[in-house]
Image (spheres, grey):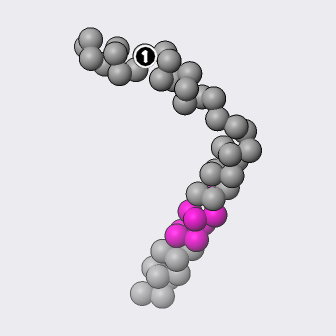
Amino acid sequence: MVSYVIIMNTSRWAFEVQAPFKKVIAWDALFFVLGIGVGAGIGAFLATS
């Protein structure tokens, strides 16, 4: 239990949260578009098989 507390300390979380909003939106949009593409590909594969 002690190691869990050491790994999840507050400074690590504070560092992760300090991301620029535009970068967060850019990554979100990138993976959203990739997810749509993969989902459409799987859907087309299942529809034609």
Q: Residue furthest top?
A: 2
Q: Which residue is the extreme one toward the right?
A: 22
Query: Is residue 17 at all visible to an observer of this figure?
Result: yes
Does the stretch in magenta take in 34? yes
Q: At 55% from the left edge and 30% from the top edge, which residue is drawn?
A: 16
Q: Secondary structure at mark 1?
A: loop
Comparing 43 with 7, the one in front is: 7
Identity of the residue drawn at 64% across and 35% down: 19
43 left or right of 23? left
Residue 38 on the magenta span: yes
* x then y, percent, for residue 38: 52, 70
* Magenta highlight range: 32-39
> In the displayed structure, does residue 24 sit left or right of residue 4?
right
Residue type for callout 1: Asn
Q: Is residue 1 above or below residue 18?
A: above
Q: Splitting the image into 4 quarters, where does residue 1 fall?
A: top left
- Residue 22 at x, y = what percent? 74, 44
Q: Is residue 22 above or below residue 12?
A: below
The residue sitting at 49% across, 15% down in the picture is 10
The relative height of residue 43 versus residue 15 in the rendered view (above or below) is: below
Residue 15: x, y in percent?
55, 26
Q: Is residue 43 visible?
A: no
Near-viewer residue (21 or 31): 21
Which residue is labeled 1 in the image?
Answer: 9
